[in-house]
Amino acid sequence: MSDPHERLFTGGLPARLANSAHLEGARKKAVETGRNRLVIVAAVFACAFVVLAGRLVHLSSMGDAGSAGPVAEGGGDISLARAEIVDRNGVLLASDLTTASLYANPLQVLDAAEASDKISRVLPELDRGELFSKLSAPNRFVWIKRHLTPRQQHAVNALGLPGFAFLEEQKRVYPQGNLVAHIVGYTGVDNRGLAGIEKRLDERLGAAAGDDGARPPLRLSVDVRVQHVLHHQLALAVEKYRAIGATGVVLDADDGQILASVSLPDFDPHRVDRASADSRFNRASLGVYEMGSTFKIFTVAMALELGTADLADRIDARKPLRVARFMIRDDHAQERWLSVSEVFTYSSNIGAARMALEVGAERQREFLERIGLLGRASLEIAEIGRPIAPDPWRKISTMTVAFGHGIAVTPIQMASAVASLVNGGTRVTPTFIADRRGVRATGERVVSDKTSQAIRLLMRLNVVEGTGKKADAPGYFVGGKTGTAEKVGAGGYRRKALRSSFIGVFPASKPRYVVLAMLDEPQGTKETFGFATAGWTAAPVVGRVIERAAPLLGIEIGGEEEEEPSQRVDPGRKGRQLASF
């Protein structure tokens, strides 16, 4: 028989307990399996949500770049952000404004005709036929209109048309309007520079695709306050003398920084399409002109520096000079022997021509090249004129260049060349960038300090006693030189079509700034007794600019000159007589 203890575990109540334990184990196994499956499903869903969330974060962080897909696919370009442009004192000249641009996917437009009708009603400046042609094309991307106003965007959005969407772009805005338009320039619809500094420094100002870093502002040498003074005075002169245009420059004599540069007529950089070619033309940097008698500054400086003339020398100006079919006369003829200072103050063409002949053509050309008048100026704007010089440089060229005919330069070149002569004799390079404030020019020496001093005294004498009297600004000791040049026409020079200019420096004893003003075809008035020459028209402009700009630049009224300029420029000793021809 079996052991009674064995029955205890294999039969009766103990056996039922064993079966119950077996069922409980199977139930637990099923629950465990279900739990594992739920965990796996939950993990899959969690991973899916993580992927979707990451994609959303990625798209939202891409901003415009994330929207650029259809643009790139359709061959368009979106406008990227650019660095701001400010004046020397931080006044904003150019900045970006975020706008919405409308585009369409023609393949998603349900009815091109209906969409064209509705869009053209909301945006009436669009041509309905051209719009229909765009929406009927088998393309996936077409621009409809760039840079909408918020009101226009709302009106288009309210139409609820399928296939249309907006891209966020940057539009360039110019808070100073036309005041600095020729300097700063403007950009195109894609925010790329098309003129001025915007074009020349496009790489510095513009952001590359995918470049999210903010670029520091570009600080210019321009002072908006001085720019406004120069602009206002030139505009008044254009109106008063009925001139067809004008230009002017204010330049730091020590380092060449341009504080103001104006060209009239000008334009609104926000509406370039409405501007004429003449108003877009930059007379200050792109136009090249015969500057007339202002060139006598260089002729006298050249002769003094090379030792072919001295302030005490006398020059035969008794009668006009004839060279072949050319006749050289004086507008303010004295018909006598003149000292070098008198040649300057009476603006004698005859005297200047004789002085240039003493120097000779080769040395004359070398001198003008050394002070930067025969090559293109190195400027940070796109519009730079190339000087026109005699070729070949004959004897008659030497004589006419001496008084500013037969050679054409830009007003900015003219101003920087004069600065190089009056600042002690160190050549300066004109610039629109304010990265050299307070740093004196370190260029090559073009004349000695003695020659520089003589030129300063002659320029001061010309304002005190000569043709530049109306440029005087009491208390600021202005020096300067007039220049009146006849314009060239089809049959030669036009005697009644003048360009009148005056270039001044102040304070004359130690010039800080150079100021140039030029009027294109001014007309005489009753006040000028019918004269339209520089002494009557351009010189007063410079005087008023200095009166109003000097306090802004920290130049105080007053100070004492060592002595009257007339007592210093013409020594009492007897000089040579220069009558060679």
Image: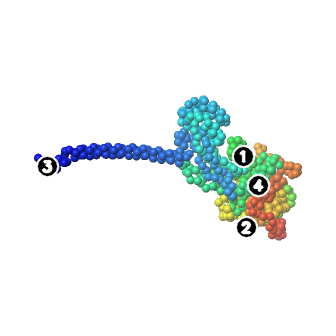
Which tag, 3 or 2, sits closer to the chain's start? 3
What separation in Å lies between label 4 and label 2 (alpha carbons)? 32 Å
Q: Secondary structure at mark 2?
A: helix
Which tag, 4 or 2, sits closer to the chain's start? 4
**Residue 270 appears at what percent x and percent y?**
68, 45
What separation in Å lies between label 4 and label 1 (alpha carbons)? 18 Å
**Front-most of 401 and 57?**
57
What separation in Å lies between label 1 and label 2 (alpha carbons)? 42 Å
Q: What residue is shown with label 1? A: 267
Q: Residues within 10 Å of mark 1 (few under 14, many from 20)?
A: many
Q: Say which residue appears at 83% left-offset and 66% top-offset.
A: 566
**Front-most of 231 and 317?**
231
Mark 1 vs mark 2: give the one in front: 1
Marks 1/2 in contact by CB < 8 Å: the verdict is no
Mark 4 vs mark 2: give the one in front: 4
Q: Tell me: 138 left or right of 377.
A: left
**Amino acid on which the number 4 mark rests in the picture:** Val
Which tag, 3 or 1, sits closer to the chain's start? 3
Q: What residue is shown with label 4? A: 229
**Amino acid on which the number 1 mark rests in the picture:** Phe
Q: Secondary structure at mark 3?
A: loop
Marks 3/4 in contact by CB < 8 Å: the verdict is no
Q: What residue is shown with label 3? A: 3
Q: Say which residue appears at 43% left-offset and 46% top-offset.
A: 46
**Amino acid on which the number 2 mark rests in the picture:** Asp
Which tag, 4 or 1, sits closer to the chain's start? 4
**Residue 350 appears at what percent x and percent y?**
81, 57
**Front-most of 36 and 151?**
36
